[in-house]
Structure formats: structure tokens, C-alpha cells
Image (cartoon, rainbow, N blue to C red):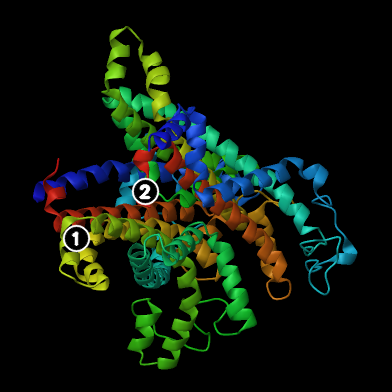
Amino acid sequence: MIRFLLRRIGVVIPTFLGITLLSFSLIHMIPGDPILVMMGERHIDPEFYKLAMHNLGLDQPLYLQYWHYLVNALHGNLGLSVRSQVPVMQEFLALFPATVELSFCAMLFAVPVGLAAGMIAAMRRGKVADHGVMGIALTGYSMPIFWWGLMLIMLFSVKLGWTPVSGRIDLLYDIQPVTGLLLVDSLLAHDMDAFKSVVMHLILPSIVLGTIPMAVIARMTRSAMLEVLREDYIRTARAKGLSMARIVLIHALRNALMPVVTVIGLQVGTLLAGAVLTESIFSWPGVGSWLINAIGARDYPVVQGGILLIATLIILVNLLVDILYGVINPRIRHAR
Amino acid sequence: MAEIIKTVATDLGHPTPLREFWSAYSANKGALIALVYLVLLAAAAILAPWIAPHSSSEQFRDFMLTPPSWLADGHARFVLGTDELGRDILSRLMNGARLSLTIGLISVIVSLIPGIVLGLLAAFYPGWLGTTIMRLMDIMLALPSLLLAIAIVAVLGPGLQNTMLALAVVGLPSYVRLARAAAMTELHKDYVIAAQLSGAGKLRLMFNTVLPNCLAPLIVQATLGFSSAILDTAALGFLGLGVQPPLPEWGTMLAAARDYIERAWWVVTMPGITILITVLALNLMGDGLRDALDPKLKRLA
């Protein structure tokens, strides 16, 4: 088990180094002088220019610059945001709970709906329900979610007035931040009205962000389920006269779940990329909209740090899924 | 009985590979409809300057935000209505198809060709060269494609060319991995060893002997890559990082339409539906191609 762990972690380290190299080189790939691009001025005081170069470490040789960048990054020091002069890490940590909350709720929508849809399609293979469910799944998979979000806002927020248009909570509530997750914080504050407001604000963004994972999970569940349903023990169960529902739920589901769990783990990347779009539609104050705003403002330390942190997160979650998979399935653990 | 066998036998013959492919592909109704749609879209895109009812940039100041023609306030001159500057949406969508299809096509070609070369190199030289290539690809895969594209565009600046470049870079790892995997399975087959023994050089082995047998999965992946290129182009345009206005790129159109969500639904709806149907059609075509080109890859359907 320890050798398995070490091997997995050993594969991740070069990838992480590569990501740091990528985010490090971002600032060097800017066409033109990074300082001039960031300051957006034609004539900068030479003293100030020198100082800015020095603060960003751009006056040192490249290998030294990278070394300092790497050491600082490993200490959680990603520099200061050009706009706010607040450490990038601090800004990220302040906004990250909003993205986590949104992503979690998106999966809360995507996993049960996707699993159920996939199972129904597998049980009704070749029938109308199968074609219908798979058609919807393929549509969801092809969905431009930024447009999907606008359509939902148009229908449910503007036309019907059921859900709020944007934000995380109505402004009239003042919740003491504890975890940063408003669902939790509003409950801790025993403020049910605020909790309700948070839930209403979460519904549409969660559906939008969960649409693609839902479609992927539905497709994966269906094919994994069909694979399992061909096994001998399923035929035995059928021969015993068990109902299809019982066979699927009790006998097949557990074995079909393995590939599905992997796919669910792999959705972290989809979620974080989707969060960029979803957050910018719903003015959701998370890391996605933070990153996009930073790009618009040419706040390169934030862009670099944001990319590095998001990529690191994805690598770590994938590593975790990999390890969990090995824990569940000994065949993987012992395979070379 | 004998007669039946005879009539069946006369039909059997040897179908040409193209015929065989077509009969397998056209058996899939969804893929067939998708193909028809894509042919029509391509025709509309190519012929847009001549068949579009108006120019994509002409502003009809008296007809701003005119609804589609089938609505009460609609106008027959503007079938899908007009946008906030009085430009004809149908004409803009047709010209937008030129942009989207061009971006998709060029970015796929620009990443497919180096992808194949790198993938074959990694398969033929599994030592340090292959390992290095695959590690680099792993790093690129650590970021979701849209985020990597955003990072690239953030540095290079928005615009048509940088969008294509970003999408080409983003697509690269999947082709490299696929080409390598396909080549690895072919590498130890008898026909490759035979070619090797008869003195074929490495280059000939790579491109003449092995590559043709690896094309099926690559073609399928190229189709799916095309669909995600169109989706990502629109996403970048929507975020203001892709093709810039006033060019009628579909995502850019949507970004401008956001402000009219409360009073002009068609400005928001039309570009989005066009993106959705196009991406859906490409995905359906990809599924159809996979089933038709490579029975081994056929999903449990």
C-alpha cells in the first residue's frame, strides 16, 4: 500500500513542477514589457519602473526568478494583487468557499440525477425512455452553459420571478462569516430566512454548473450498467425471478459504480472551468469571476496565482481519486 | 431455400471500404441528420456574403430590436429579428458560422498534425524522448481545456488569431495520447515487423506503415475536438477574451445580448441555439463516425 501511495505521488510531482513552470512563464510570454502592459502608461518614472521590476523579481536571471517563484509558491506566497495590494493567496482563500459551495451544490444536482437517468436508460435499453434520456444527456453534454444560464435567468428570474438574478444572498441579510460557506454560516446564525435566501440564490447556478457533469455521469452510468448487466450473476439473479429494479439496484449498481466514481472525481476540472462561466453570468463572487476580472485588469500576479492554485487543486483531487480507487479495488493497487 | 441463398450471395460481393463505411454510418439516424445539418451550415457559411439577406454589419436604425418575423411586431425583412443596433440576426449568424467553422477547422488541423507527429515519436522512441513528450502532455492535461485556453489568451491578448492558437494548444494532448496509444498497439503486429525486416526506415514505418492504421480513432477525436473548439471559442467570446466585436462571432453576440435579456429574448436565444445545435451535431457525427470506422470502439449501444 505504501509503495502504491509513493508511486502515485511520485507521478504527481513532475506534473506539479510543470504547472509552476507554466504559471511562472505566463508573465514572460506577455508580448512587450510586462510592467508597461500592467501599468498601462507610456511614460513611467524610471525609478518607479525599477522598483516594480525589482518587486516582481524581473531584474534577476531567469533560473533564479523561477527558483524564487517556486520556493515562494511552496510557502503559499504568490505575490500581491496589482489592483488591491492584497496577497493573492489571501484573496483566493476568501473567495474560494463561494466556489466550493457552488460546485458542491452542482454535484448535489448532477450525481443523483445523472445516476438515475443512466440507470433508467440501461434498464429500458433501446426503448423510448433510453433514447429520450440519452438524447437529453447528449444535449446537456453539448450545452454552451453560459447561454443555458442566460436562458434560465430569462425564464425563472425575469419572467416568473421565482429566483434571484445574481449574487449569493439578499443584501439585507448580514451573516457573520465563519466557514465562508453561506449555507453553513446562515444555519450557524440560526437565521432561517437568510438560509432560504442562500438556497434560492444557489438553485439556478447549481443547475447550470451541474448540467455537463450530469450528462457525463448519465452516459457513464448507462454504459457501465450495460456492461455489468451482461455478467453471469445477473442472469442467475434473473433466472431466480428477481425484479429488474431489484437486480439493478442491489446486484448491478455496486459493481457499475466503480467507473462512475472515477468519472465523478474527474469532474472537478469541469466544475472549476465551468465555474468561470457560471460565476460570471450570475455575478457569483468566487474564484472564477475573480480570475476573469483579473485578466480584464491585467492583474498578472492574480492570473498566475489563480491558474497555479486551480491546477494544483485539480491535480490533488485527481490524486485523491486515484488513491481511493486503489483502496477500494486491490487489483489496481497491486497492478504495476 | 437454395434460391434464397443464391440471391443473398449475389448481393454480398465485396463492398468498397467507402461503401461499407457509408452503410454503417447512415444506419445511425442521428448521425445522418447531424451530417445534413452540418453540410447546410457549411454551405450557409461559405455562401454567406452572397445569400445572407443583409450585411452582417449594416445597422437598420429604424428597426432596432425588431422581433422575429413570425411574431406580431416582426418584420418580413428580418427573419430572426434584429439586435440592439438594428443588425439582422440571421445574417450575423450566417457570417458567424464562417468564423466558428474556420476557427474550429484551423485549430483542429494545427493541433492534429503536430499531435500525430509527437504521438508517433513517443510510440517509436519510448525512452527519454517519449517520456518527456508524455510528461509535457500530462502537464497540459492538468488544466481543463477552457482554463488553459483562458490562460493563453490572458497572456497573448484576445482576438481571432490568438483564439485559434489557444485552442490548437489546448487540443494537442488528446491527439498525442491517442496517436501514441494507437501506434503502440500496431507496433508489434506482424505487418509492421515484416516492413521493418524488409528494410523500411523509421520515417517510412511511422508515416506509411503505422499511421494509416491509426487514423480511425484520430478522425473521431478530430470531430469531437472540432465541437469542443466551437464551444470554447464561443465561451472565450462570451467572456470577452475571444473574437472581438463587431465581428459576429456567436459567443461575442451572446455577450452583447446579455443586457437585453429582459426585453428582447430573441437576441439572446438565437446565437445560443445555433451554438448548441452545431455542437450537438458534431458530437452526434463523432459518435456515428466512431461506430462506423471502428467496430472495436463501438459503445454498448
Mark 1 lies on a secondary structure that is helix
The x, y position of residue B218, in whole percent, is: 44, 35
The x, y position of residue A226, in whole percent, is: 30, 57
- Circle 1 residue: A235
| Label of residue B46 in the image | none
The x, y position of residue B247, in whole percent, is: 73, 49
Which amino acid is tagged 1?
Answer: Arg
- Host chain of mark 1: A
- Host chain of mark 2: B
| Label of residue B299 in the image | 2
| Residue B272 occupies quadrant | bottom right
Q: Is residue A46 above or below residue A191?
A: above
Q: Is residue A76 visible?
A: no
Q: Are marks 1 and 2 on the same chain?
A: no
Horizontally, residue B192 falls left or right of residue A303, namely left
Mark 2 lies on a secondary structure that is loop
The x, y position of residue A108, in whole percent, is: 36, 72
Horizontally, residue B271 falls left or right of residue B71, namely left
Q: Is residue B19 above or below residue A181?
A: above
Q: Is residue A249 above or below residue A169?
A: above
Horizontally, residue B174 falls left or right of residue A330, namely right
Q: Say which quadrant the N terminus of chain B sits in.
A: top left
Graded by Cα atoms within 10 Å as few (under 14), some (14 to 19) or many (20 or more), the crowding at tag 1 reads few
Q: Residue shown at 33%/50% (left/top)? A: A72
Q: Residue shown at 33%/45% (left/top)? A: A70
Furthest residue toward right: B62
Near-viewer residue (A34 or B233): B233
Q: Is residue A200 visible?
A: yes
